[in-house]
Structures are given as C-alpha cells and as structure tokens.
Amino acid sequence: MSIRRRCRANFYILSHGIIPPMQTIKNLLMEALAKIDGTDSQLLELTAATQLAFGDYQTNVAMQHAKKLKKNPRELAQQIVSALPENNILQSAEVAGAGFINLRLYPEVLGRATAALEEDDHLGIPQIGSLQKVVIDYSSPNVAKTMHIAHLRSTIIGDAIKRLHLASGYEVIADNHIGDWGTQFGKLLVAYKTFAKPEDVSEDSIEFLEKLYQSFNLKAETEPELEEQARAELLSLQKKEEPNYSLWKKFIQISLQEFEEVYQRLGVCFDTIHGESFYNDQLQSLVDELKERDLVRESEGAQVAFFESDQYPPCVIQKRDGAFLYATTDLATVRYRINTYKPQRIIYVTDSRQKLHFEQFFSIAHRAGWHCDMQHVMFGLMKFAEGVVMSTRKGAVIPLRDLLDEAENRALQVLEFVEYPEDEKREIARAVGIAAVKYQDLSQNPISDIVFQWDKALNLQGNSAPYLQYAYARVRGIAAKHEEKFPQDTVKDAAIVPKLEIERDLCLHLLQFGAVVSRATESCKPNHLADWLFGAASRFAAFYNQAPILREENQEIRHSRLRLALVFSRCMSKGLNILGMDTLERM
RNA sequence: GCACCCGUAGCUCAGUUGGAUAGAGCGUUUGAUUGCGGAUCAAAAGGUCACAGGUUCAAGUCCUGUCGGGUGUACCA
C-alpha cells in the first residue's frame, strides 16, 4: 500500500451581536424552569424539531425531570409551558407525545433571524477556534509513486477538515508529511543505476520512477541479492554520498512537481511540506530524550517503549542495527510541531490500519510531556469490487489523474447540447467533475470502507455535488433575471416573512448551518456538512417549485422570497467552499 | 489467541452523540399547463436496524454475550 501513513458548540454570539433564536428560546425556558422547584437548568436541551408538524424546536426537559421530581411528564411539561414568560417570540408552545414541548416562532421572528445570517461575517458559524492553533497532517504521498485513487481519501478529507477549522476560526497549519525517506530509495537507486531505462516514458516523470521501482520488485523475487545491493545504496544515501544524494533530491523534485499538478486540480494547498527526511537529524536526540525520561529501554538489542499493563504491544523506536523507524520519525515530528507551532491540537488523517501506531505514539508523546490534543482521524480502505486491497508494488491501480479526467469528461458530455462558449463549458465541467469526485467521498462517514465504482464516484445526479451546484446556479440565474426585470428594486434589506410551510422549513434549516459546521469541525466529519448541504438544496428545490419569485406580483412576497433564496445561496456557497467545491453562476 | 472497526431498504450509504411514525440517492413503478434552468420536482413500492439479553420514562444509538465481515498485532511505512 503506497499510502505511507496517513469533536459541541452550544450557544454563541454572532459577530453582529444578534442573538440566534435558539438562544432566545433557551433563555425563556430557563426562566420558566427557575419558577419550578427542583429543576436543573443544566439539563435543558433544545433541538430542532424532528418533524415540521412538531413545530420549529423541541425540548425533552420535562421527561428528564419527571422521574426525579416524581411527576407525570406531561403535567410537568404543561407546568413549564405555563411558566414561560410573556414574550413576542413564541407563537405557540405545546405539550405533545410522552412529554415533549414543541415550540413555534412567529414567522416574522423566524424571517428576521434568517435574514440576520447574512449580516454575520461567518454566516452563523460559531468561532470556536479563535486564538487556537491546529496542525493538520494529511495526504502524505510517497515520493516516486504516482498518486492514485486511494490517495484521494486522505487528501480530500484532510483538505475539508482544514477548511472546516478555518471556517470555525482556527489558525491552521496544513502539513504535507511526504514519504521522502526510507528503504524504497535503496531499491530505486539500484534500479536507476543498473536497470535498462523504460523507454516509453520521460525520464523526468514519476511514471519513470515508478516503473523502475516495479521492475526492481519483480526482479528481486528471483534475484534476492538485489535486496542486499539496495541496502548498500541506502546506507550510502544516508551518508549523503554522491551521486546518490543528488539523485535522491532529483527524485523528490520530480515527484513534488507531479503532486503539485494534482493538488492544483483539486484545489488543495499546504502551509508546509516537511517530509520524513526533514527530521533525520533529530532522531538520535529524540531517542536520547526518551531514554532520559525512562520511556524506552533496551530489549532484545533494540530501543523499545512499553505500555502500562501491556495496553498496547511494545513499540520499537530504534532497531538493533541502530536504524530508526516510522514511530521514531512521527515522535520527532510531534516534538518539532509542538515546540515550533505550540498548537492546541494536531490532527492526523490516515487510513484505519494505522490506528495502533497512532495510539502507541500518542501515548509515548503524552508521557514525554508534549502536551497537545492529538487526534487520529481514520478512514476506511478503498477497495475494488473484488475486494482486493490496492497496491503500487506491482502496479495496476487507477492514477488519480485518470479519475479526474474521466470525471471532467462525463460532466462535459452533459453539456453537449448546451449553447455555452467552449471554454466556459470546460470550466463548468472541471468544477462539476472535481466536486462530484470529492462529494462521493465527503458525503459518507470517513470510517466506512468504500468500494470503488466508476459510476458512483462520478455520479452527477441525485445526492451529488452537481445537485448542490445546480441549486446555487438557479438562484444566481433568478437574481440576474430579477435585476433585468425589476432594475429599480433592491432586496438587500427586504424582510423575510415565511408563509408557506416550505419557506419555514428552509429558514429553519438555514439557521442550523453554523451549528452543523461546528459539529463537523469538532468531530472531523465533513459528511455532516455534506448532509446539511443536500438538505438545504432539496428544500430549496421544493421551495423553487412551490413558491414562484419573479412571477409573484405582490412585491413584498417577491422580495421576501428572493431574499430568502439569496441567504440560501450565501450559505450554499460557503458550505460548498468548506468542502472544497467551486460554485458556478450557471451550468 | 488478543485488540480495534463495521453489520440499517434489492444496491450504495446517512442517522444531530439516548428522543416522537428509522431517512436519502441509485434502481423499479406513476405523474409534472416547453418550466423564474428537467443535472429538476411530486408520488408509490421497498425495514424484525445481524441475533439474544440488559440499562432507561425512551435504544439503530449505551452495556454484556453470540454470529458474520474487515484490519492490526516489536525491529515495513
């Protein structure tokens, strides 16, 4: 496998100082609870109603108190409702079911809150990360190997986690910890120096290096002495002897150029690229420091860390022959990052097979006194339909480039009979194709294994990125037509007054945006945001169908609807951007 | 052997950290005055949430056990 390696906002004040409706309702409920003996306002939870018929928001606080207070839950709920202070917020408060309290806002209140989202610099996203720094370690491809579809997960999920943290106000350091050191370079050097050069590819290309590597593995099966040569070349490289040292640097340069091409297509960028080799000269001091702290000791000739009551198997930090390992580099990396950046949190995005490794070195790092919240965000394996784990050792994988090309081509086919300029079509196909590939990955729980299927990876219909982009493009289309048709009209400060049920529904959904982003950030699960976006787009589609805007003759209603659509488009744009997807004015 | 992850509609997957009648997409079936853009919308059919206990006013969600699938398990990364 060539992938080397690799959290609840409650209430908050928005930047414009407008208090969100949930906070207002919660305050009213707290006042009511205070009038009832024995209630604990800490237990108060307010959530969005699970069904439109139940109102806007609901609380189960009565059921939670009923047993303790030895009261009938419905009666207690009624008591709480009766104790609510006079207000001009709640249109209704009703007891339902086993003791739920269902709450409904006045339409004007709901509309004002929705419109207020636009006034907030962050569209209602709580800035839970302000003054906090987080290092995110993701993508991390291996030098001299083409990026293929299995690299997609770490890169795309990592990039979305980065953007989520930025949107939540964190200072982010995105670090690409590329695999630029290790035994594969010994093999590559042997092949480069002694094998016939592959002729069908350019010598400056990553395919060239990859073919050399593959032919080494093939030959080594029958000629075991090659492995010995590889070890010798590696040793020479480690001593920085020429020409090995220069060749190694050249391999890295070729690889980085190719990676950069893919990253640009994906819209992914890093703040630092500190590969494994960056830490080479820190490894011995690291082992020494761990020895001083009694965290490692000699065992069977190696330097090994052990764990309390054998919670984990032993972890070798330095081999019998003095060489360092994966865990050594990772520990040195943690030490460097904490000393250099002083982050509150470090996040690693890798596949789930590395769980034990991370638990081990997190434990060692904590005991070494390198205090920081370290989190391993793991994702499942990508498999082919046959269920075979992919490997670059023998080739036969789908290069990432091919996947992206295919995605863009399929998107272009949809535009075949559309009369847009050719270059615009290509731009649309690019934005749609890339987003579609990203969405199929980001819309599911990262932990699940995924079975790669072309049709699924490149889906352009239903619950897919183009569906979200299409909803956005429709609003932009309406806004443009509105300017043509009513050039004197301005809706910038128009009041939103949701009258239809679908309008209420859309408003309520938009008001959840900030909390959803927070949840996605803290749990490092971009799929929560993807879900929200799909929910928003499908509500908009229904709204679009039921509530005409430009055809509406009543100006107040027309303005209300258009303003609502515009708030929707702002949230969509922000949300899509957080998932690393581009928006289009038309498609 | 031990540890961890997963098991939800025919298929691919969600499920707001314990809340009301378990949701989408695809596929299947039916419909939408050429529509403010049909990459869309409206609707139907499809479920013993692997199984068995337990905790709770309330369990797909938490605990225990069983079965099935996956991954890992000291000198690879």
Image (cartoon, rainbow, N blue to C red):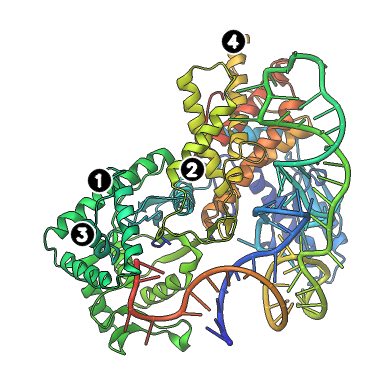
Q: Residues within 10 Å of mark 4 (few under 14, many from 20)?
A: few
Check contact, mark 3 vs mark 4: CB within 8 A: no
Q: In this view of the protein, can residue A331 be seen by the observer? A: yes
Q: Amino acid at mark 2?
A: Leu
Q: Amino acid at mark 1?
A: Glu
Check contact, mark 3 vs mark 1: CB within 8 A: no
Q: Amino acid at mark 3?
A: Thr
* Parent chain of label 2: A
Q: Is residue A489 left or right of residue A120?
A: right
Q: In this view of the protein, can residue A121 be seen by the observer? A: no
Report the mark closest to the observer, 1 or 4.
1
Query: Circle 2 is placed at which residue position?
Result: A403
* Parent chain of label 3: A
Mark earlier in primary sequence (3, 4): 3
What mark, if any, has residue A529 been given in the picture? none
Q: Gap between marks 3 and 1, in whole Å?
A: 15 Å
Q: How many marks?
A: 4
The quadrant of the rendering that contains the C terminus of chain A is top right
Q: Gap between marks 2 and 3, in whole Å?
A: 34 Å
Q: Gap between marks 1 and 2, in whole Å?
A: 24 Å
Q: Amino acid at mark 4?
A: Glu
Q: Quadrant of residue B14?
A: bottom right
Query: Circle 3 is placed at which residue position?
Result: A194
Q: Quadrant of residue A33?
A: bottom right
Mark earlier in primary sequence (1, 2): 1
Q: Position of residue A36 (x, y in %)?
A: 77, 62
Check contact, mark 2 vs mark 3: CB within 8 A: no
Query: Circle 1 is placed at which residue position?
Result: A203
Q: Mark 1: which secondary structure? A: loop
